[in-house]
Image: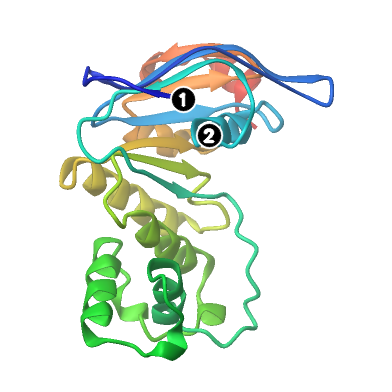
Amino acid sequence: MITEPVSDNLLEIRDLSLTLGGNKILNDVNMDVRHGHIHALIGPNGAGKTTLIRSIMGGMPHKGSINFRFSDNGRIGYVPQLLEFDHSVPITVFDFLYLMLRKFPLFLGRRRPMREEILEILKVTECAHLIDRGVGYLSGGEFRRVLLAQALVPKPELLLLDEPASNVDEVGARHFEKMLIQLKQEHGHSILLVSHDMQTILRIADRVTAINRTVTYDGSPDDLSLSALVTNVT
């Protein structure tokens, strides 16, 4: 994983291949993610999308190169598709974020500045009103917005989202789209988004890369052919 000087591309992947247990998961993947873009990653189940995201985060052994051209702090924020969490645990949104953002445990005391900081974080994803809500009582969409909030601190240059609107109804999904556009336009985030929702992609993505172990399409969402949609999105 290499960090290089600033260019129009924030992320450049070249000839990336990955084999696990003798199975070729990714083969000669090449793609670029530009600064200030929402870049959608699509493909059928088992195509290697999540494996590619994990490779970008440095968590998977691979051949080829992943080069970052950061201009600021070089931080990557991440929202996973699934997060194993016991929703029966009596913990509030404040406690949840406090645990994730502080190095010392809750029993050492809560300081008011920390609460104010968490409120500001939640305002970005329009869920400050949930700060004292039990995590177990959140809807799927509300929980995804809380996860997105924690991924934004400290501010990342690259935001990786793996199916961020999964298990969210149509109203919640449209609200999520609005937030992602705001994060790009108002906060300067670059976003790599894994999604199966072509309507969302057509509405908000600047560029699309389709993979099925290798890249099968890379370009504007408007130029995706019907055959590409049938082959690469399920």
| Relative height, residue 97 to residue 82 (above, below) | below
Which amino acid, mark 2?
A: Gly
- Secondary structure state at the residue bearing disc 1: loop
- Along the viewing direction, whichever of 55 and 82 lies nearer the viewer: 55
Q: Is 67 positioned to the left or the right of 125 in the image?
A: right
- Along the viewing direction, whichever of 101 and 141 lies nearer the viewer: 101
- Along the viewing direction, whichever of 210 and 171 lies nearer the viewer: 210
Residue 226 image-quadrant placement: top right
- Residue at 39% from the left image edge and 75% from the top image edge: 98
Which amino acid, mark 1?
A: Met
The spot of residue 196 in percent (x, y) is: 55, 37
What residue is shown with label 2? 58
| Relative height, residue 152 to residue 20 (above, below) | below
- Secondary structure state at the residue bearing disc 2: loop
- Residue at 29% from the left image edge and 55% from the top image edge: 154
> Which of marks 1 and 2 precedes in the sequence?
1
Farthest-out residue, right: 22
The spot of residue 171 in percent (x, y) is: 41, 59
| Relative height, residue 204 to residue 231 (above, below) | below
- Mark 2, Cα crowd under 10 Å, few <14 / some 14-19 / many 20+, is few
| The C terminus lies in quadrant | top right
Task: Tell whether label 1 touches label 2 (CB within 8 Å).
Answer: yes
- Residue at 56% from the left image edge and 30% from the top image edge: 55
Q: CA distance from mark 2 to mark 1?
A: 7 Å
What residue is shown with label 1? 1
The spot of residue 15 in percent (x, y) is: 54, 9
- The label shown at residue 53 is none
| Relative height, residue 99 to residue 17 (above, below) | below
Q: Is 134 positioned to the left or the right of 63 in the image?
A: left
The spot of residue 132 in percent (x, y) is: 38, 86
- Residue at 23% from the left image edge and 20% from the top image edge: 5
